[in-house]
C-alpha cells in the first residue's frame, strides 16, 4: 500500500506543475508554509475512511442515533488529525546545512539545522535511502544524515523530504527542501605506490643527545653534569660512568609537488598526492604542497591536512 501511494504521489508531481514549483534549489533559510505542504491519506487513513462509510450507512439504515453520533465523532477526530499533521510542518524552517569531510565513495556527514518558534514532535526527514526522525522540544534540532558520494569535487545537495504522519497516522503531510548549496568531496587516495622522492639522508635518524631514552654509558669527562653520572653503575666500575640519552631527530619535511609526479594522468596524480598527504599526516611529518595555481607552505595538523585535501579536490 505504501509503495502504491508513493507511485501515485510521483505521478501527480509529474502531471501537476504546481506540485513541483518548490523542487528547484533555494537559498537558505527555507521556511515551510501552507502553499508548499501537501497532505495525502495513508493506507490506514483510507481503511478508516471506508469503515466510517460503512458505519454511517448502517446507522442511517437502522435509524440508530448513537451509532451516527459515534461515526461523526470519529470523523471529527480524523479531520483534527489531518490539521495536526499540517501544523507539524507549518512554520518549520531549515536554517543551515553543515557538511563534514569524506573521500569519494564514502558517505559524507550532513548536519541539518531546523528551527521553530514552538515545539514539534514526530518529524522525519528523508535523504535518498536514509531516514531520520527528530523532534524540536527547545525550538532547535541538529539532524545528522549520510550523503552518498561518487566523485571528487563539488557536489550539489539533493532534494530532502520532510514529513510527518503525527498524531494518528491517518494522513501524511510532506514538503520538499532543496538547499542551494554544494559540498566538497575529497579525492580517493591510491591503494599503494612509491613514496615521494626525498634526499637519501632524510630518513629517520637517531642522534645521541640529551633526550628521554637512555642510550648508553660512557666514561666521565671533565665538564659533565653531576646529575648525569650513573652512580650505581660507577660503583661496579673502576671509574665514573655518565649516562648518554638519545632523542630521535624530527622527521624531515615532505615537499609534495604536482610537477614531480610524471607519467600519470591528472586523476592518478591527484590520487597519489592524496596518498602522500595521508601518509605524512599519519607519520606526523610537516609537509608542503605545490599545485598548478596554488602553493601551500609547510605545516602539519588536521587543519593543514584539510586545506591540502580541499585544494586537491578543487582541481579541474
Image (spheres, helix red, strand yellow):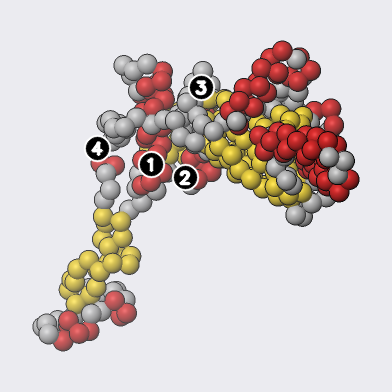
| Mark 2: secondary structure | loop
If the image is split into quadrants, where does the N terminus sit? top right
How far is the residue under mark 3 from the one under mark 4?
A: 31 Å
Q: In this view, does 234 lie above or below 120?
A: below
Tag nearer the camera, 3 or 4: 3
Label 3 or label 4, whichever comes before in sequence order: 4
Disc 1 vs disc 2: Cβ atoms closer than 8 Å?
A: yes
Label 4 or label 2, whichever comes before in sequence order: 4
How far is the residue under mark 2 from the one under mark 3?
A: 21 Å
Disc 2 vs disc 3: Cβ atoms closer than 8 Å?
A: no
Query: Where is residue 28 shown, x and y percent of the image?
Result: 75, 32
Label 3 or label 1, whichever comes before in sequence order: 1
The residue pinned by badge 2 equals 300
* Quadrant of the rendered image containing residue 287: top left
* Quadrant of the rendered image containing residue 19: top right
Which residue is pictured at 36% across the width and 51% down the height? 250
Which residue is pictured at 56% across the width and 37% down the height? 130
Query: Where is residue 58 shown, x and y percent of the image?
Result: 79, 38
The residue pinned by badge 1 equals 280
Label 4 or label 1, whichever comes before in sequence order: 4
**Disc marking residue 315:** 3
Query: Where is residue 84 shown, x and y percent of the image?
Result: 81, 43
Along the line of sight, the residue nearer the viewer: 10 or 95: 10
Q: In this view, does 312 lie above or below 280?
A: above
Tag nearer the camera, 4 or 2: 2
How far is the residue under mark 4 from the one under mark 1?
A: 17 Å
Tag nearer the camera, 2 or 3: 3
| Mark 3: secondary structure | loop
At label 2, counting other C-alpha atoms closer than 10 Å, the crowd grade (few under 14, some 14-19, many 20 or more) is: some
**Disc marking residue 200:** 4
How far is the residue under mark 4 from the one under mark 2?
A: 22 Å
Amino acid at each position: 500500500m505504501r509503495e502504491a501511494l508513493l507511485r501515485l504521489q510521483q505521478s501527480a508531481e509529474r502531471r501537476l506543475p504546481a506540485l513541483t514549483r518548490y523542487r528547484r534549489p533555494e537559498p537558505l533559510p527555507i521556511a515551510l508554509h501552507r502553499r508548499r505542504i501537501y497532505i495525502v491519506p495513508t493506507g490506514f487513513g483510507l481503511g478508516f475512511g471506508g469503515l466510517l462509510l460503512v458505519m454511517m450507512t448502517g446507522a442511517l439504515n437502522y435509524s440508530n442515533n448513537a451509532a451516527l453520533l459515534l461515526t461523526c465523532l470519529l470523523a471529527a477526530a480524523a479531520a483534527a488529525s489531518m490539521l495536526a499533521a499540517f501544523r507539524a510542518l507549518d512554520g518549520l524552517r531549515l536554517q543551515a546545512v553543515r557538511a563534514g569531510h569524506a573521500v569519494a565513495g564514502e558517505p559524507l556527514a550532513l548536519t541539518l539545522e531546523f528551527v521553530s518558534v514552538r515545539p514539534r514532535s514526530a518529524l522525519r526527514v528523508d535523504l535518498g535511502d536514509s531516514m531520520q526522525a527528530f523532534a524540536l522540544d527547545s525550538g532547535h534540532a541538529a539532524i545528522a544524515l549520510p550523503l552518498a558520494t561518487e566523485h571528487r569535487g563539488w557536489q550539489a545537495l539533493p532534494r530532502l523530504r520532510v514529513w510527518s504522519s503525527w498524531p494518528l497516522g491517518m494522513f501524511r503531510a510532506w514538503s520538499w527542501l532543496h538547499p542551494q548549496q554544494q559540498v566538497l568531496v575529497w579525492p580517493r587516495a591510491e591503494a599503494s605506490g612509491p613514496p615521494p622522492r626525498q634526499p637519501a639522508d632524510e630518513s629517520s635518524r637517531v642522534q645521541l643527545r640529551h633526550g628521554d631514552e637512555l642510550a648508553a654509558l660512557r666514561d666521565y669527562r671533565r665538564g659533565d653534569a653531576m646529575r648525569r653520572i650513573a652512580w650505581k653503575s660507577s660503583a661496579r666500575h673502576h671509574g665514573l660512568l655518565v649516562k648518554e640519552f638519545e632523542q630521535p631527530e624530527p622527521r624531515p619535511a615532505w615537499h609534495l609537488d604536482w610537477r614531480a609526479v610524471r607519467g600519470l594522468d591528472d586523476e592518478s596524480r591527484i590520487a597519489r598526492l592524496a596518498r602522500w598527504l595521508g601518509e605524512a599526516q599519519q607519520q606526523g611529518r610537516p609537509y608542503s604542497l605545490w599545485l598548478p595555481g596554488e602553493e601551500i607552505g609547510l605545516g602539519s595538523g588536521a587543519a593543514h591536512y584539510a586545506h591540502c585535501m580541499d585544494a586537491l579536490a578543487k582541481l579541474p
